[in-house]
Amino acid sequence: MDANTKTVMSQTLGCKLNFAETSAMTALLEEAGYRSVRSGKADVFIVNTCSVTETADQKDRQAIHKIVREHPESFIVVTGCYAQLKPAEVAAIPGVDLVLGADYKLELLSHLRDTRNEAAEIVTSSNNEIAGFLPACAKGDRTRYFLKVQDGCDSFCTYCTVPFARGRSRNPSIASLVEQASRAIEEGAKEIVLSGVNIGTFGKRTTDSSVTGKQTLLQLIEGLDEIPGQHRFRISSLEPDLLTDDIIRFVASSSHFMPHFHLPLQSGDDEMLDLMHRHYHSDLFADTVSRVKETMPDAFIGVDVIVGMRGETPERFESSMSFLKRINVSQLHVFTYSERPGTQALKIPYIVPASEKKRRSELLHLLSEEKRTTFYESQKGKQMKVLFEHGNKAGVISGFSENYIRVEAPWCKAWENTVQTVVAPSFNEDKSALTVSAK
Ligand code: SF4
């Protein structure tokens, strides 16, 4: 079959970085003449997997089995974190043709075959050799794009497999990222989310040999900020010890960077932070939150928390809860701990029973609801610039304000993918958004 007539389909599991990378791999095949399809038959099927928890591995396996069943003619490529961490396990799934490790995503084309493989081919490098960078800027929907600015991590937190699956921290040049962002804006991007594994370490290693001297995250932000237009940028997540005063001041003064921070805390208890091998204690985190709030009182601060990790005794959980209650943040993103083979956390003897993990997770979700409602309450009736997204859900159009408040308004086609200045004086029914009553 001629390459021009070949088709490619994909399924992505896991994080936004994976979505961006699937889109980059599909684009590579499109450049080679493949046509991207969403249904029907496909010559090549890319499954981009996640391995953040044991449940993620299970979902990967279920998805692969289903795809093999539904696409018996397709050449099935499995890539992503699960493929990198457990290539033999993936290759043993009947029907898989190619297992592609983290460093080979860019070389996908050269490993495709015209006929199905008898047994899966495994193309991976060892975890500590991963060094490449797959540039990716994906269109999430018509409004929002995800620009991959960094990959990998050097931190080795004791519960995490990401440094094994994605290698050490690295990034491309600022010039290449500004170029990618400019192209996305020309295509119509209204908001670009800077994505990565540990963005705060931007500049530690560059994969671009033309870069001389050290580049920093602040320089990246300054470079992106110079792109003319009405678009917005958000920073997806920043380690609390890497959010500097310079970055806070810059975001506060920028019309492009939104007053929205996502800080991974993981636990509010210092003994747990030590067991996790995090690089700070709760006082540093509290200080980071205060520094943001002093400069931008209306900034949205979302916080990642892991619940039920080994070592989290009832006392440590209580101490974490009481810290979380005290700090002025807008929302919690709660993740239930899951055991990952090969991690240092498995050496910690104290295990939290599953039912107790569930109970703690529910308490944290309740606290998160309270915090979000309090934050939204504080913003009710203020003038906000909302980027409305597309889609008419039950007569409603919705979008996000600069400080990440979800705002709903009566459906208005003309507002799709536009920024509107509105006042939202009340909550919607389930308190998940503020509402604009009339236009
Ligand atoms: S900072 Fe810690 S949790 Fe985050 S990716 Fe690196 S090792 Fe994993």
Image (cartoon, helix red, strand yellow):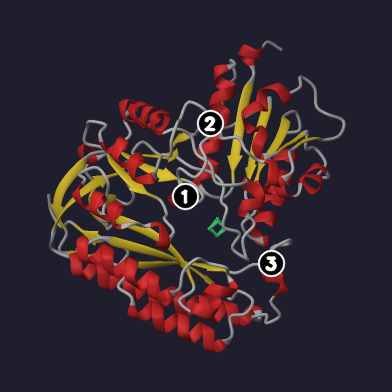
Count of numbered circles on the image: 3
Q: Earlier in the sequence, mark 3 or mark 1?
A: 1
- Are there few (<14), some (14-19), or many (20+) residues within 10 Å of tag 3? some
Give, as a three-letter code, the residue at label 1.
Answer: Thr
Q: Which residue is mark 1?
A: 201
Q: Is residue 296 visible?
A: no
Quarter where residue 158 is shown = bottom right
Q: Earlier in the sequence, mark 2 or mark 1?
A: 2
Give, as a three-letter code, the residue at label 2.
Answer: Ala
Q: Is residue 181 left or right of residue 397?
A: right
User: Separation of disc 3 and disc 1 at Cα?
Assistant: 22 Å
User: Separation of disc 2 and disc 3 at Cα?
Assistant: 33 Å
Q: Earlier in the sequence, mark 2 or mark 3?
A: 2
Q: Return the x and y of residue 365 as percentages of the image width and height.
A: 44, 73
Q: Which residue is mark 3?
A: 344
- Are there few (<14), some (14-19), or many (20+) residues within 10 Å of tag 2? some
Mark 3 or 1, which is nearer the eye? 1
Give, as a three-letter code, the residue at label 3.
Answer: Gln
Tell me the element at label 2. Answer: helix
| Residue at image coords 81%, 46% | 88
Tell me the element at label 3. Answer: helix
